Image (spheres, helix red, strand yellow):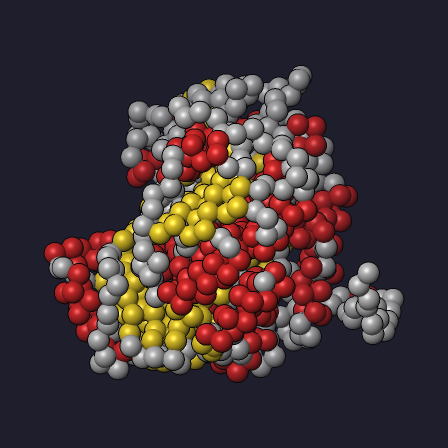
Amino acid sequence: MLPAPAVTGRPGAPLRVAVVGGGPGGLYAAALLKRLDPGREITVWERNAPDDTFGFGVVLSDETLGGIEHADPVVYAALQDEFVRWDDIDIVHRGVHHTSGGHGFAALGRRRLLEILHERCRSLGVELRFRAEAPAPAELSGAYDLVVAADGVRSLIREAYADVFGPSVEEHRCRYIWLAADFALDAFRFEVAGTEHGVMQLHAYPYAADASTVIVEMREEVWRAAGFADLDAQESVERCAKIFADALGGRPLRSNKSAWTTFRTVVNDRWSHGNLVLLGDAAHTAHFSIGSGTKLAVEDALALAASLQERSTIDEALAAYEEERRPVVASTQRAARASLEWFENVGRYVDQPPRQFAFNLLTRSRRVTHDNLRLRDAHFTTAVEREFGCPPGTPPMFTPLRLRGLTLRNRVVVSPMDMYSAVDGVPGDLHLVHLGARALGGAGLVMTEMVCVSAEGRITPGCAGLYTHRQADSWRRITGFVRAQAPGTAIGVQLGHAGRKGSTKLMWEGIDEPLEEGNWPLVAASPIPYGPDSQSPRELSRAQLTDIREQFAAAAWRAARCGFDLLELHCAHGYLLSGFLSPLTNLRTDAYGGSLERRLRFPLEVFDAVRAVWPEERPMTVRISATDWAEGGTTGDDAVAIARAFAAHGADAVDVSTGQVVADERPEYGRSYQTPYADRIRHETGLPVIAVGAISSWDDVNSLILAGRTDLCALARPHLYDPHWTLHAAAEQGYEGPGVAWPKPYHAGSRRPQTGRTDAPKPRLSLET
């Protein structure tokens, strides 16, 4: 264990600063700190020579450049003289070339960027020590007021205090190599090559008037099958040039100590310890496919310098720096992961039409969306829509989808949302208003909450059921309202059994907490309680399995007579049928446990029993948890196999959710974070899917549908916030076609109400005092 760093909280700004790492982030931090306070003594240690660099071009965004312009006009002016700028992205797939414009990039050579920063540091009086190993972290922290660890992905300072920083380094599945070509491409170019060994991809862009960066990437197994593991560096370069000869115009590639490597995603629990602070790749990394490594490091430097300028003590400044940067970096890392995983799995999309493939690629990180791309390049976006089948002026979300005998007029689904407001399982007025309002709100399909097949199968005493005639009569009232007042809107029922997650309090009284009185006995695949305070369930016997199967069939029979258009079998979220599917909750040793095939047996038996009584022309879907977010649980491969099994038994679509199977799960939340699981199932099985999970905007819905990542999008919280979410989405997009219809009594509200004036004249003159 190393000695603790020097005590923080010293009054005033740091006067002696050590920067470890002479990359763009470290150099820019040194220059900014010296410029803000010329009295500071700042030393940069860099183990390599001044002109050593292992990349070629660097891409910076307008946002980053704006920050540089305000913080240091000298550096900004020097960069401006060097930048190569372009607007287009070229995508080549199956020999077809598509171009999308309006994107706006600026790049320069990494070596030239370093030279500019070296010159700026020297002019300000920063001491640059090249070919010099920095002293040990403990020695630095004792000798300096502030130590900036900008020493990269393999940061020695981070590792020296790993128990404090809490680093996580994840290695990914693709091999890639950084190369260059001695000519300037006229656009950012992505190209996919289908070879006998598998899919390979090229990422390339200009960074000078006579040079371009070229990155070649492929899955590890493709890399090995193609023989790259047995080639020396020059042979690899020549082989890459041959594979992508069309993109290069037959020109050669060159290397700069380039080697095949795998990308590492770095995340840290903390970015500072005492007077040590992490910056750039030492703190975080983001995949090169969104061009963010140097960008993030430079923005870190800007935020760190500003925080030190604004705060009175070092510990306050470092806390402010991390508070400001962490959410921005987390957002970037989520986008980078989405992009990285898209390229890892690019083989999944190679059968898409070339123009849709291009749209899918452009929107892969979720930062470029359908609406955003329309602003950048309306011609390209309109062409993608036309090929998808959108009538003129029709957003993708308002195109119809047919499942068996049911045609949904648009792609919006109101997710099942438990109301916990039934009495003895009977849905009441709140259910009528809740479902009726959302049916009037324009969605193509409105789903009930999980409707339980028995009193013992309820989650809470307030859960609705379909195991009595009285319950069925009440549901018939609701479906009748939808049919009469919201024609064109389909209503679906979700059937389920709580299993080991039953007999709990209402959500607002304590989610998943057991009842204090009035409990009923629980049953499950295996006698494992959900949480430490949960009731222990009994393992179901063969006879009980038969009884429950018949309860599902009886509820489905009633649902058909209630007039529901679609039935969904709930096999997710740790409820009874989900409990059979997950290896974490099914420890049985009989024919219903063990291998995935055997764990599927009971859910499939239930599905078959329900399908047998459910009208042939009406579709059935299945909701699954595609991952348990826990070690040893359901995997992505399992999810695909589960979807295939239900499809073979007649499922018309899979509703792809995740988690809630075990209490100690560790989900990775984020915008549309569950969609990649739906995307995989759709492309590997050919089965229609419903995507769920933090999809909150109509722009996201359009993007996901048009990219071919899902067929339907289910939204819950947005429909709680706005029951007329779909109608408002149509109004905001200026759409008035058959994919949505305003109820006649509401038609006067189909235009956004006027608001107060917001266009007051702005001041013409501002004076600094």
**Vertical relation: 113 (above or below) 625:** below
- Image point (73%, 68%), residue name: 742
Q: Is residue 258 left or right of residue 582?
A: left
- Image point (78%, 71%), residue name: 751
- Image point (59%, 45%), residue name: 321
In the picture, the quarter occupied by the C terminus is bottom right
- Image point (42%, 45%), residue name: 20
Q: Position of residue 319 (x, y in %)?
A: 61, 39
Q: Is residue 539 left or right of residue 460?
A: left
Q: Quadrant of residue 356?
A: bottom left
Q: Position of residue 351 (x, y in %)?
A: 33, 69
Q: Is residue 419 visible?
A: yes
Q: Is residue 720 left or right of residue 364?
A: right
Q: Position of residue 220 (x, y in %)?
A: 24, 53
Camera-nearest residue between 190 and 647: 190
Camera-nearest residue between 363 and 393: 363
Camera-nearest residue between 731 and 88: 88
**Vertical relation: 58 (above or below) 174:** below
Camera-nearest residue between 534 and 107: 107
Report the label total: 0
In the picture, the quarter occupied by the N terminus is top left
Q: Residue furthest top?
A: 517
Q: Position of residue 367 (x, y in %)?
A: 53, 62
**Vertical relation: 615 (above or below) 245:** above
Q: Quadrant of residue 184?
A: bottom left
Q: Is residue 473 left or right of residue 143?
A: right
Q: Is residue 616 visible?
A: no
